[in-house]
Image: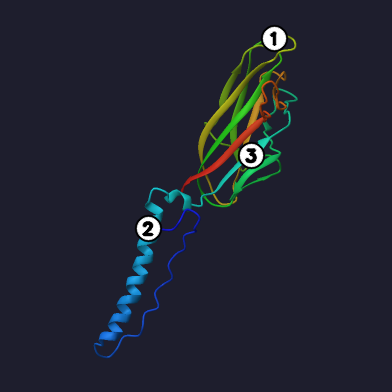
Amino acid sequence: MPSVKQQLTTPAVPDLPNPQERYDRLSFAQTNAVMRNFFLKLTNLFSALLGTRGAQYINAPYGAFQDGTNQTAANTTTAYAITFDTTDFANGVTLSNSSRLNVSQAGVYNVQFSIQFKNTTNDSQDADVWFRKNGTDIPKSNSRFGLAQRKSAGDPYHTIGALNFFVDLAANDYLQIMWCVSNTGVSIEHYAAGTSPTRPIVPSVIATLSYVSNI
């Protein structure tokens, strides 16, 4: 069994000796030894993949992205693409044009997001979030998040919009997360690191795209 730090390799095709005209014990033993060694490598390979730590050898595409800026809507009749300014992890999934999550391998992917919404108005508001593939809205992918009115003039209402969604993507497809609001007083907000107690920055958006299976 390989150690946790080893990488698995596919056994090479066995180099079998040429067959003899007549039965030869030595030649047969050599062939048998080559085949035994090949099947031993195959057994070790499958044992590692199917064992309790087999997942460590699976190299599936994934990407994790976030944004550290405030995102606003100029009006209520326009759909906006959510943008990112940081790539946390990337393996076969890349960010382009600030909003496009590109995949290099076809398959079914799980996209998840966490959006920090803020409402500064005196009324309850809504924010819609949905997905686009290659610039076209994905049917039945929209979600509506309700935001209560602000608590006071200097204390807006905050809530997290979160969701996961399965989508099939071909190689070189890209995915975008879109949003619109019922009032421009609704925005996507980031917050600086806090003190007393010390706590991390609040990104305005966090999103991940993970490979699930072949299409």
Instruction: Name, please, the residue furthest toward the bottom.
Output: 21
Q: Position of residue 19 (x, y in %)?
A: 31, 85
Q: Are marks 2 and 1 in contact (CB under 8 Å)?
A: no
Query: Which residue is painted at 63% across and 22% down in the image?
Result: 127
Mark pair 1, 3: CA separation: 32 Å
Q: Eyeballing the image, is 85 above or below 77?
A: below
Foreground of the two, 196 or 186: 196
Q: Eyeballing the image, is 158 above or below 28?
A: above
Mark earlier in primary sequence (3, 2):
2
Query: Which residue is painted at 40% across and 60% down in the image?
Result: 45
Mark earlier in primary sequence (2, 1):
2
Q: Amino acid at mark 1?
A: Asn
Camera-side mark, 3 or 2: 2
State the mark number for residue 65. Answer: 3
Q: Which residue is mark 2?
A: 46
**Quadrant of residue 67 in the image?**
top right
Residue neighbourhood size for the residue with mark 3, other residues' Cα within 10 Å, grouped as few (<14), some (14–19), many (≥20): many
Q: Can residue 135 be seen from the camera position used here?
A: yes
Foreground of the two, 104 or 26: 26
Q: Can residue 102 be seen from the camera position used here?
A: no
Residue neighbourhood size for the residue with mark 1, other residues' Cα within 10 Å, grouped as few (<14), some (14–19), many (≥20): some
Where is the N terminus found, in terms of image quarters?
bottom left
Mark pair 3, 2: CA separation: 34 Å
State the mark number for residue 24. Answer: none
Q: Position of residue 138 (x, y in %)?
A: 56, 36
State the mark number for residue 122. Answer: 1
Q: Eyeballing the image, is 168 above or below 44?
A: above
Mark pair 2, 1: CA separation: 61 Å
Q: Amino acid at mark 3?
A: Phe
Query: Which residue is painted at 41% across and 72% down in the image?
Result: 13
Disc 2 secondary structure class:
helix
Q: Amino acid at mark 2?
A: Phe
